[in-house]
Image: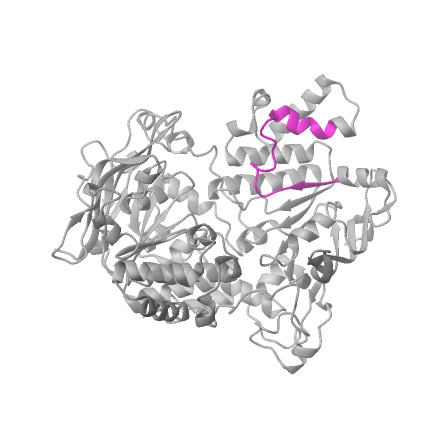
C-alpha cells in the first residue's frame, strides 16, 4: 500500500444558479501521494478552483454542494477521514481547514481583512489551531514572516494589509498558510496577479518551503510554465472534467489529449518564430454543454461518436490517463479506481 | 528605417503627478510616472513596452492620445491623412480630436470597457456618430464589416456585452477601436486577462490586422513571452524611465541592462527539465516612485552596482545599432541572453 494523503473519487460538485444547476466539477478522481506536487491546469471555468474548494468544504458557503463522490483524507497512514461526509461548519472540518490543509489564494488583498494588522490575523490562526498563547503566537508569526523574507518582520507584524506591497502580501499569505505546518497546501493561482520578478521570488520561495517542510502541494494555475517548473504530476481539466492526467514530464513530452496538445501549442515561446496555434471557438458554457465529449466542437480530430458519446478514461500508457476516444474503444476504459500516477510514474 | 516612415515621435515626455496632502491639498511632491521618455514608432511596427507595475507604461500609453495631459515633452504625429505634422503639445481642440481618431486604445478588461446598457452595434458605431457623417444604414454596414473582420457574426450586432465571452468582448473592443481607421493602436494589457487559447486567437488577429491595415502598435504588457512574440522592438521601463530599448531579438539574445537580464531570469518557462531548479531572483520590490533612489534608479536591486551608480544617473545611450541602454556599464557587463539563462538554469542543482 502506498502512502497517500488524499484520495478523491467520482467527485461531482453542483452550483445552484438562477439559470439552473451547473456541474462545475464532474467525475473527478485522483490521488495524491505524500510529498507530491500535483498541478491542476485549465482555463477559466474548467473547475480547477472548485475542485480545491470542494476538498476544503468551502463550496457549501457559495450555493454549491457536493453531489457525489468522496474525498478521503489520510493525515497519517492509519487514519482516514471522509471530508465529504463532514458538515461544512462542523468542528472537525474547522480543525482541518486552515490548519492541516491550508490554502493560498490568488488575490491576497481579498484574503486579509483590511481593518486588522497582518500579524494579528496570522496569530489568530495559530491560537485557534495550535492552541498557542497570544505571546507565543506573536513570536511564531514573526518567525514565519522572517522565514518568507519579509524585512523588519517584528515591525511589520503590526502593519495593515494596505501597507504591504502586492508581493509582500502574497508572502504574508504564504507565511500564514504554512504557519501551522499543514500536511497539505493548496495554492490557487498564487502568482497570477503578480509581476514577473515577484512571481519568480514566490515560486522560488514555494520550492524552498516544499523541500524544507516536505509538504504535499496542489498547485492550481492556468500557466503551463508554472506547471513545468513546479509540479510532479499534472491534471488538465476542461469544462469540469479531467481531460488528461500524467507526470509533468510525460505531459510536456507526449501530450495525448487534443486539448492538451492545442494548449501547449498556443503558448508563446521565447525565441520561437513559429506562428501560434489557436484553438477555434471558446470554452462551452457549463449551462449548455455539448452532448458527447465537451471538447468535440473545437477538436480537430473529432469523430462522429465524439459528438454523441462522452468518452471514458483510458490509460494508453502506465500512469498516463486520458479521456478521449482516440485512445480506446468502449470496454477498454480504466475502472474508476483511484489514480496512482505517482507510484506508476515514480522517479519524476 | 527611413525618416518618412516614422508615424509617431515622442520626445522628452514627462508626466508628474502631484502628491497632495492636508486640508488645503498642498502639493508636497511629485510622482515621476513618466520621466523623460523619447522614442519613435514607424508605420507597421509593433513596439512592446514592458516593466513591473508602477513603472509608468500605462501612463505613457495614455499620454499619447492625451487621455492624460503630459507635463512636458513633445509628441509629433505624421501620416498620410493629414499631410504634415501634428504637434500634440500645442494642438488645439480640433487637432486633438483628429489625433484621437488616429490613435485608438484597447484596454485590459473588456467587461469594464464596454457599456453594459449599449448594444454591440451602438458600442462599435459610437465613434462614427461624432466623427463621420453617415446614415444609420451606412453605420450598420460599417460596423457589420468590422465585426466580421474581428470574428464576431454581424447578426449578433443587437446583443448586449454580457451575452459574449471574454474573448469575444475583446474582439468587440478591437472592432470599436478600428472603426475610425486609426493608424496607431495602443494595446494596454489587451490580452492579459484572457485564457491561453483565446489569447492566442487575439494575438493572431492583431498580427493579421497589422498586415492588412499596416497598423502600428504600442503593445503594453507585463508578460514577456507575449511581448517577445508580437513585438519588433521592445522598450523596458523602470520607474518611469527607459532602461533599455532594442530590437526584440537583440534584447533577448544580448541584453545590455542588468534590469533586463533580471527580467529574463524571472520568466517561467514551459520546460519540465527546469522543475524545482534554483534560480537567481531579483530581490526586493520596486522603490517608491515618489521617492526614487539617487543615481541610477536600479542600483538598489542591481547585482552589478558600483559606486558611480549610487551618485550619477546614467544617460540613455546607443550601445549598438538601434540598441539603447541606460547603464554605466552597458558596454562591459557580460549579461546573459535568454537561451544562456535557460541552459544555466538546467545545470543548477534542484532544491533539496
Q: Quadrant of residue B110?
A: top right
Is residue B98 within the magenta segment?
A: no
User: Residue at coordinates 49% horizontally, 52% vertically from top-left?
Assistant: A193
User: Residue at coordinates 45% horizontally, 68% vertically from top-left?
Assistant: A150
Q: Quadrant of residue A322?
A: top left
Q: Position of residue A238 (x, y in %)?
A: 36, 38
Residue B275, visible in the rendered structure: no
Q: Position of residue A41 (x, y in %)?
A: 37, 47
Identify the magenta region.
B102-128
- Position above or below: A178 against A67: below
Q: Quadrant of the C terminus of chain B?
A: bottom left
Is residue B107 within the magenta segment?
A: yes
Q: Nearer the viewer, residue B81 or B35?
A: B35
Question: What is the residue that sits farthest to the front in this orientation?
Answer: B23
Is residue A326 shown left or right of residue B337? left
Residue B105, visible in the rendered structure: yes
Q: Quadrant of residue B31?
A: bottom right
Q: Nearer the viewer, residue A209 or A238?
A: A209
Question: What is the residue that sits farthest to the bottom in this orientation?
Answer: B307
Is residue A263 shown left or right of residue A78? right
Is residue B33 shown left or right of residue A341? right
User: Residue at coordinates 64% horizontally, 38% vertically from top-left?
Assistant: B209
Q: Position of residue B313 (x, y in %)?
A: 71, 73
Q: Position of residue A347 (x, y in %)?
A: 25, 61
Amino acid at each position: 500500500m502506498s502512502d497517500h494523503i488524499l484520495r478523491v473519487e467520482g467527485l461531482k460538485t453542483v452550483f445552484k444558479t438562477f439559470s439552473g444547476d451547473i456541474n462545475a466539477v464532474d467525475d473527478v478522481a485522483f490521488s495524491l501521494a505524500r510529498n507530491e506536487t500535483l498541478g491542476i491546469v485549465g482555463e477559466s471555468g474548467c473547475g480547477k478552483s472548485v475542485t480545491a474548494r470542494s476538498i476544503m468544504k468551502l463550496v457549501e458557503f457559495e450555493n454549491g454542494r457536493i453531489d457525489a463522490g468522496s474525498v478521503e483524507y489520510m493525515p497519517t497512514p492509519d487514519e482516514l477521514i471522509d471530508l465529504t461526509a463532514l458538515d461544512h461548519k462542523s468542528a472537525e472540518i474547522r480543525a482541518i481547514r486552515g490548519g492541516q490543509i491550508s490554502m493560498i489564494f490568488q488575490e491576497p488583498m481579498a484574503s486579509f481583512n483590511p481593518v486588522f494588522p497582518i500579524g494579528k490575523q496570522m496569530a489568530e490562526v495559530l491560537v485557534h489551531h495550535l492552541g498557542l498563547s497570544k505571546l507565543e503566537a506573536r513570536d511564531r508569526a514573526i518567525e514565519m514572516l522572517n522565514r518568507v523574507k519579509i524585512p523588519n518582520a517584528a515591525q511589520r507584524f503590526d502593519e495593515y494589509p494596505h501597507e504591504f506591497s502586492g508581493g509582500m502580501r502574497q508572502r504574508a499569505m504564504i507565511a500564514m498558510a504554512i504557519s501551522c505546518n499543514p500536511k497539505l497546501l493548496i495554492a490557487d493561482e498564487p502568482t497570477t496577479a503578480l509581476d514577473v520578478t515577484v512571481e519568480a521570488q514566490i515560486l522560488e520561495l514555494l520550492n524552498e518551503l516544499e523541500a524544507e517542510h516536505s509538504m504535499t502541494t496542489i498547485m492550481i494555475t492556468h500557466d503551463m510554465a508554472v506547471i513545468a517548473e513546479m509540479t510532479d504530476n499534472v491534471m488538465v481539466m476542461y469544462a469540469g472534467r479531467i481531460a488528461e492526467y500524467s507526470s509533468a514530464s510525460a505531459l510536456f513530452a507526449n501530450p495525448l489529449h487534443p486539448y492538451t496538445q492545442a494548449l501547449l501549442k498556443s503558448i508563446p515561446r521565447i525565441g520561437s518564430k513559429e506562428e501560434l496555434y489557436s484553438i477555434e471557438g471558446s470554452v462551452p458554457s457549463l449551462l449548455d454543454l455539448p452532448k458527447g465529449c465537451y471538447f468535440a466542437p473545437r477538436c480537430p480530430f473529432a469523430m462522429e461518436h465524439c459528438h454523441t458519446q462522452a468518452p471514458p478514461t483510458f490509460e494508453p500508457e502506465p500512469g498516463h490517463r486520458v479521456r478521449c476516444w482516440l485512445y480506446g474503444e468502449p470496454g477498454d476504459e480504466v475502472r474508476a479506481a483511484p489514480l496512482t500516477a505517482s507510484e506508476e510514474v515514480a522517479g519524476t | 528605417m527611413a525618416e518618412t516612415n516614422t508615424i509617431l515621435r515622442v520626445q522628452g515626455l514627462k508626466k508628474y503627478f502631484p502628491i497632495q496632502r492636508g486640508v488645503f491639498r498642498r502639493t508636497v511632491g511629485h510622482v515621476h510616472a513618466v520621466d523623460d521618455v523619447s522614442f519613435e514608432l514607424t508605420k507597421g511596427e509593433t513596439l512592446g513596452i514592458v516593466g513591473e507595475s508602477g513603472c509608468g507604461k500605462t501612463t505613457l500609453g495614455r499620454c499619447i492620445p492625451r487621455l492624460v495631459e503630459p507635463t512636458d515633452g513633445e509628441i509629433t504625429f505624421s501620416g498620410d491623412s493629414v499631410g504634415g505634422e501634428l504637434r500634440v503639445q500645442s494642438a488645439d481642440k480640433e487637432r486633438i480630436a483628429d489625433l484621437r481618431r488616429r490613435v485608438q486604445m484597447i484596454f485590459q478588461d473588456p467587461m469594464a470597457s464596454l457599456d453594459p446598457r449599449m448594444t454591440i452595434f451602438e458600442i462599435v458605431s459610437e465613434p462614427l456618430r461624432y466623427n463621420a457623417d453617415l446614415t444609420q444604414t451606412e453605420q450598420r454596414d460599417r460596423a457589420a464589416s468590422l465585426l466580421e473582420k474581428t470574428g464576431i457574426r454581424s447578426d449578433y450586432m443587437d446583443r448586449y456585452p454580457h451575452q459574449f465571452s471574454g474573448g469575444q468582448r475583446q474582439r468587440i473592443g478591437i472592432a470599436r477601436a478600428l472603426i475610425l481607421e486609426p493608424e496607431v493602436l495602443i494595446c494596454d494589457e489587451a490580452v492579459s486577462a484572457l485564457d491561453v487559447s483565446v489569447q492566442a486567437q487575439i494575438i493572431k488577429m492583431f498580427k493579421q490586422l497589422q498586415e492588412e491595415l499596416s497598423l502600428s502598435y504600442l503593445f503594453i504588457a507585463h508578460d514577456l513571452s507575449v511581448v517577445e512574440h508580437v513585438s519588433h522592438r521592445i522598450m523596458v521601463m523602470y520607474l518611469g524611465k527607459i532602461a533599455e530599448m532594442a530590437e526584440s531579438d537583440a534584447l533577448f539574445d544580448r541584453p545590455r541592462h542588468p534590469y533586463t537580464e533580471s527580467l529574463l531570469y524571472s520568466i517561467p518557462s514551459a520546460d519540465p527539465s527546469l522543475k524545482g531548479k534554483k534560480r537567481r531572483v531579483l530581490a526586493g520590490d520596486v522603490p517608491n516612485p515618489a521617492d526614487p533612489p539617487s543615481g541610477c534608479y536600479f542600483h538598489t536591486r542591481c547585482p552589478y552596482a558600483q559606486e558611480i551608480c549610487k551618485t550619477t544617473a546614467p544617460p540613455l545611450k546607443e550601445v549598438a545599432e538601434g540598441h539603447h541602454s541606460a547603464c554605466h556599464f552597458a558596454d562591459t557587463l557580460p549579461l546573459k541572453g535568454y537561451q544562456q539563462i535557460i541552459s544555466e538554469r538546467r545545470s543548477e542543482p534542484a532544491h533539496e
